[in-house]
Amino acid sequence: MSPTVEPADSAEIGSPAARRKRRRIVLPLLLTAAVGGAAALGTTRPWERQSSVAEQPSLSHGTVTVEKGSLSSSIQVGGALSYDAPTPVVASGHGTFTALPAVGSVVKAGGKLYEVDGAPVVLMKGNRPLWRDLGPGVGDGADVKQLKGNLVALGYADGLGLAVDEKFTPGTATAVKRWQKALGVKETGTVVLGSVVMLPQTRVRVQKVGAQLGSPLGSSPVLTVSSTDLVAIVHPAENQLSRFAPNGKAVVNLAEGGTVQGRIRSLIRGGDGGDGGDSGPDGSGGDQQKTAVTVVLDRQDKARHAGPSSVTVNVVGDTAGDALIVPVTALLALDGGGYGVKVVDGTTARLVKVRLGLVADAKAQISGDVKSGDQVVIPK
């Protein structure tokens, strides 16, 4: 039989004893509510800011279908095709420019780069500029070895048994005279400072002409030359830099259609790629404050057909095929660690712990007691 609760008179309700009695009744109720609240918070959504219960907004929920398919962490960044490794060329010696090349022209090692006082200045392959005349009686040096290597490669030392070393021998002078005869200049056997430009490439493209016909030689660059190969230069955001690993694979989407495979060669902060590649299709350069990434291309024929132009570069990341995929908003961070999802089962929802795989594009790969087609709870 239920106990009868007798009403208290108004005087008793306001008495100190009555107030103490009410506190004894209310306290257990508050503890019960607190325990229930803690249990309810046993799973939390990792994307929500953890704050007090009073601060948590009320959320409405919906459902989404667990999908089966492929998930990729690749990203896409805009960029441009440009000629690789622009290099300024400064003229040595004295004189007046009497001929200059056209922008876009290609010069091979042994060919005329420009002309001073009516005499050709020839491109040769080398990593260091010449700083003195090279002829009979000159001291040994790496510059002599560099010159002899070019004379051999260009065929002017054929039959002379010329060793590519640091000594300027009589055979070296003979090879120089043969070279001078082919150029149509006086055969002295001495290479005069300023008559040769040493560059690392065996073939260059004239990108920019900085001198004027009739102007005297000075310290400013005569030309800017580049490689004849095109590269893709991109400027990723700071939070994308970790995706650009050295030698990482990339796919370059050309503006006119088609793609070219490539690999990441360099990442330079606050520059144009460090390799000198232009940031813009017009060769004018880009934002020098951004980090620049250079992507070398596997197929130059496709790139040359497109020419300097805008491109988009896909950086290949991890890929998961035949994966169960849910939005990241469906994930619940569990008290004991790991993640779970709430799978709708009729009119109820059950919490299922899942293993997390690849996460990309606000989607997550999961595995566990979940199958394709299941409905999982997400906040609206």
Image: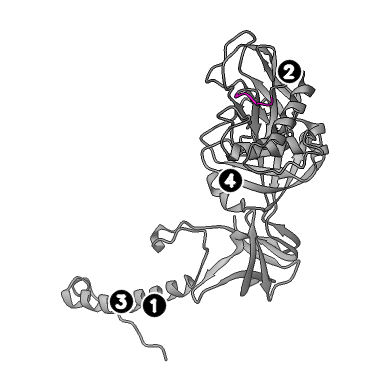
Number of marks drawn: 4
Of labels 3 and 2, earlier in sequence is 3
Q: Residue furthest top?
A: 214
Q: How far across and how far down the image is residue 331, in percent?
A: 59, 65
**Mark closer to the observer (1, 2):** 2
Report if the CB atoms under discs 2 and 4 are less than 8 Å apart. Answer: no
Give, as a single range, the part of the protein colored magenta.
189-193
Q: How far across and how far down the image is residue 273, in percent?
A: 59, 39
Q: What residue type is labelled 3?
A: Leu
192 magenta-colored:
yes
Of labels 1 and 3, earlier in sequence is 3
Q: Can residue 153 be seen in this view?
A: yes
Of labels 4 and 1, earlier in sequence is 1
Give the quarter of the image for residue 284.
top right
Q: Residue furthest left?
A: 16
Name the element at disc 2: loop
Of labels 1 and 2, earlier in sequence is 1
Q: Name the residue under label 1.
A: 32
Q: Which amino acid does label 2 sit on?
A: Val
Name the element at disc 3: helix
Callout 3: 10 Å neighbours few (<14), some, many (20+)?
Answer: few
Q: Name the residue under label 4.
A: 267
